[in-house]
Image (cartoon, grey):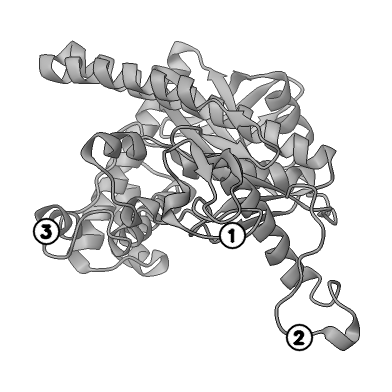
Amino acid sequence: MKLVVQVKLLPSPQQATALEATLRACNAAASEAAATAREVDCYRNYDLRKHVYQGIKADHRLGAQAAQHVIKKVCDAYKALAANVRAGNYGKPGSKRRQAIETNPITFRWEAAQPYDARMLSWQRDARTVSIWTVDGRVKNVAYTGSADQLKAVTTLPVGESDLVHRDGMWFLYATVEVDEPELIDPNGFLGVDMGIANIAYDSDGTGYAGGRLNGYRRRQQRLRRRLQVKGTKSARRLLARRRRTEARHAANVNHVIAKTIVTEAARTSRGIAVEDLTGIRARVRLRKPQRVTLSSWSFHQLGAFLAYKARRAGVPLVQVDPRYTSQTCNRCGHRDKRNRPDQETFTCRSCGVVAHADHNAALNIAQRGVEGWGAVNRPHAARPRSQRGGDLQAWPSRAG
């Protein structure tokens, strides 16, 4: 499997000037190629090269490899844009925002990331330096640093394509490394994980994760953003951008910790992990106005992605299950009723009388669905004797439920 490792570059002033000139040239060429692509209605990599390759090489002093990466970056950006349009993320057909997105060309900030391959970037691991192509020629002996794990990864693992990034006045390389992926264990049940707003995550063992603290932090950031937006000065806009990145890093760190804890517990107990398939939840749910900001700032997709890759690295199976009615269904008797949820936190079954924390009950249902889904695919004949096969599968035992 592939992982992305971030290392920080430590260029001299002359080296930093060459790197900045390179990013400016590459992204100016990308904006020019994007405008041409929109003008000629051509978004395929090899087809677009016929229209822009020679021009951006000559006008922006790009080498052959850099020019090809710029064209590919433009095509990938339009591909992502088209996917977002199809998903309805830019409004309904005919809306002003969607029309602007569909007709105007993509533009690139001067400091947008630029891909580098092995022909443009080489690593001197013993000296802890890199040699990197720039528009001013090859720049050698650019020092880099990072955490112990990051340095170990780029030293001992095969490094693929990397991205040159300028952020907050600093230079970084995001390097793709190849990591051996262990075989998946044969799970003895599943650990269900219910993701929500009051609690970021709640597992079927009854452990809740950090909902109140992170939501309180986000509310404070929201109040600060509101004051800065009202002020509207140039320094206020700079502070807004800085605070946005700070909040994103804080949320990512919280999600990393939660995902690592869940995967570690699943691996320790030889269980798989079952999570809800929350694709498109923002379009599906209907919320009161005060809740919309909370939902929009809820990084459940990021937590799901962290769980997925950490589980793969640990050899823990992860399955996505249908989330419908997990919060209304009793995990003990299976009775489903909206009235089983008298409030956000409490679950009370109107059939068998069981009382539980609502998120814990939902996590138990998710765990059971994980068992059934995994068993249907990987153990289709394990649950019943040969004479009784067919029909609905009986779930095999689970520690989680």
The residue at the point 40 percent across, 64 percent down is: 45
Residue that label 2 marks: 390
Callout 3 environment at 10 Å: few (<14), some (14 to 19), or many (20+)? few
Instruction: Give the mark nearer the N terminus: 3 vs 1.
Output: 3
The residue at the point 72 percent across, 19 percent down is: 148
Report, in whole angstroms, how far the alpha carbon at label 3 lies from the one at label 1.
34 Å
> What's under tag 2, amino acid-wise?
Gly
Instruction: Give the mark nearer the N terminus: 1 vs 2.
Output: 1
Residue that label 3 marks: 95
> What's under tag 3, amino acid-wise?
Ser
Q: Secondary structure at mark 1?
A: strand
Residue that label 1 marks: 321
Q: Is residue 34 above or below residue 132?
A: below
Q: Could you tell me residue 165's position as x and y percent?
A: 45, 31
> What's under tag 1, amino acid-wise?
Val
Residue 77 tag number: none
The residue at the point 26 percent across, 47 percent down is: 31
Report, in whole angstroms, how far the alpha carbon at label 3 lies from the one at label 2.
51 Å
Q: Nearer the viewer, mark 1 or mark 2?
A: 2
